[in-house]
Each structure stands twice: as C-alpha cells, then as structure tokens.
Amino acid sequence: MQAPYRIELPNDFGMGSVNAWLFTEPEVVLVDSGEHSEHSWKALNEQLAAYGVSVADIQKIYITHAHVDHVGMAARVVAASGATVYIPEYAYDICVNTKAANLKRFEVIENILLELDPNPQAPLNLGYRMIFEQFQDYWIPIPKEKAVPVPMQDFQVEMGGASWEVMYAPGHCNNQICFYQKEKEWLLSADMILKLLPSPVIEPTIAPPYQRNQSMGQLIDSLKRFRALPIQKAFPGHYEIIEDVESIIDHQLSRIQMREKMCHDYLSKQKASFFEVVVHLYGQGFSPPCIPATLGYLDLLDMKGFLKKQSTVQGVVYSV
Ligand SMILES: [Zn+2]
C-alpha cells in the first residue's frame, strides 16, 4: 500500500502552512484541500505535478474537519476535477452552507466573548471579529451534489489501496475525524496530533441547546485515547510527519497540566479578568489561539470545582 505524500500549502492564518495528503494509487485521493487563495492553488498544482498527477485527476477528497485551512479550497478542486468530497457528518452543514453556518457559529462565539469582556472594542473581541471577516474569502462552499457525509466513527474508507478506519477526534473542534490504518499503524491525524498543542476552539455544542462546547476536556480525552493506540507514523494537518507520537502526546498532556496550574496559582493570589489571565499566561503579544486555550484551562479548574466566577459590568472576574 502507498504512504500518503505531503502537499504543503500556504496558510495565511498564522500556522505557516497546512498539509493536504495525496494518494496517487489506485485512484487519486486528497485528504484536506488547503484554504482558498491564488497562492494556495498554485502550490497545489505545482506539487501535484511533482507526483505526476494534476488537479483534474483527483477523484475523491476526504475532509478531516470544517476549518478554513483544511476545507476552504475543496470546491475549487471539485470545479476542476468533478471529484466527490467526503465530509465528516458533523461538518457537513458548514461545508455546504458555509456562509450561513459560519455566521451562526460566529454569533455564538461573539456572545461568549462579550460575556468575558462586554466592550466590543476590547482586544479579545476585535481580534476574533477580524479573523472571522478575513477567513470568509478563503472558504468557498462545496456544491451539495458533490458532498457526501461520512459517519463520525465505525466506518472504513479506502485510500492508497488500504482500509482506513474513521476515528472521531473532538477537542480541537467537535467535527474532526482522523483516519487510522491498522496494519501499518498509520494515522492521518488532522489537527488532533500536531507538534504544537492543538487549540481547543470556542464553538457551540453539536446538539441543542448549543451551549459552549467543553473543548479542553474533549481534547484531553482524545489525546489519551490516541495515546493508547499503536501509532508508528502520524500524518498531521500541519508540519512534518510525526514518528514519536507517544512522547509528543505526553509532552502536550503535561503542558496542559502546567498551564492549568499557572492559572490556578495566579488566581489564588488575586482576582483577574479573562484578559488578565490570557496576558499572565502568554504575555501582551498573545496570538488568537491563546484565547480559546485560556478558556479551556479555566474550564478545567471549573470542572474540578476550584473556579469562582463573578459577573461585573466589566465582564467576568475570576478567582479560585
Ligand atoms: Zn488546521
């Protein structure tokens, strides 16, 4: 069977690049599609050519999760190839009704952030709005007639002449799947196993009443589940192939513990706003993914019954 080839595409949202994974035999299959931009399209075409195939040859695209850098350009590939796109069931709506579903998602996120800091001009709120507005252009919807939902688990797909098991992998987001090849012990790991700790994004739950998803708890559970799985190689959504999966996961679990402890120690000495906690953990120049991560660490303290929350006109004030 064939190992997937790494197609490294540009990412304009701070990750440097994003991977699509290519199988050329027995049919041309792409896992994830990169984000929609001219330089991403050019990079895809050039790299496919290096493996002797073209976009027009692509027959199937499997999507790992509904984030702009993984799905944004799929519709352009479909237009050029007629390929069918297989989408995790939970990600289906946002991949075909992209604009409306993203708007709904952002409304939920915006309300959560406004609870943390009611000032719409606060750096938290401004930062998120900016990202949301930017990524619209990078993400085009997949035509319904070419989109097929894939069950979140207990399902096999064929790629590279072998069977891959679909594994539900919530934590980074709640619509993510990975693909596991049992004989080779290979995992197409999406943004579940990365060299950097995946960011547990702010999003509503899959089912009503659409409260805020407990992403950090899910991320820890998923990391532990994949830690118990024999994995020789992970083919991740960003950066290079990972061969020391166990030590990467152990490192990430210990980092989560360390950050949670930092939050606890800080809040045991003083009360602080959400923004102050973010700055304490990451410094003034924090990047956007630090926001959901911080919320996740606070969730962990909350789950253990340590966290005290006080709503004020300036937003939530935390202590332990
Ligand atoms: Zn990603």
Image (cartoon, helix red, strand yellow):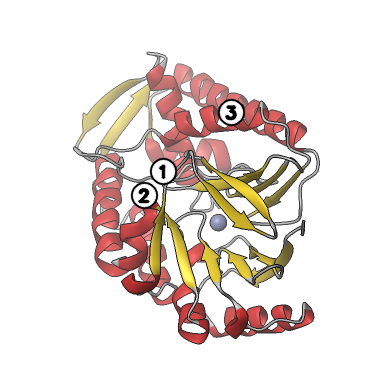
Question: Is the CB–ligand 1 distance for label 3 below 8 Å?
Answer: no
* Distance of label 1 from label 2 (alpha carbons): 8 Å
Q: What residue appears at the point 55 percent right and 36 percent down from the top-left corner? A: 281
Location of ligand 1 given as a quarter of the image: bottom right
Asked if residue 167 is positioned above or below residue 141 in the image, the reply reads above
The type of residue carrying mark 2 is Tyr
Q: Mark 3 or mark 1, which has the lower sequence index?
A: 1
How many numbered dots are placed on residues in this image? 3
Query: Nearest the camera: 18 or 179?
Result: 179
Q: Position of residue 169 (x, y in %)?
A: 51, 40
State the image quarter where residue 181 is shown.
top right
Cβ–Cβ under 8 Å for marks 1 and 2: yes
Mark 1 = which residue?
Answer: 174
Q: What residue appears at the point 54 percent right and 69 percent down from the top-left corner? A: 60
Label 2 sits on a secondary structure element that is helix
Q: Residues within 10 Å of mark 3 (few under 14, many from 20)?
A: few
Give the mark toward the camera: 1 or 2. 2
The type of residue carrying mark 3 is Arg
Mark 2 = which residue?
Answer: 90
The type of residue carrying mark 1 is Asn
Q: What residue appears at the point 63 percent right and 28 percent down from the top-left corner? A: 253
* Distance of label 3 from label 1 (alpha carbons): 15 Å
Q: Which mark is residue 225?
A: 3
Q: Which mark is residue 282?
A: none
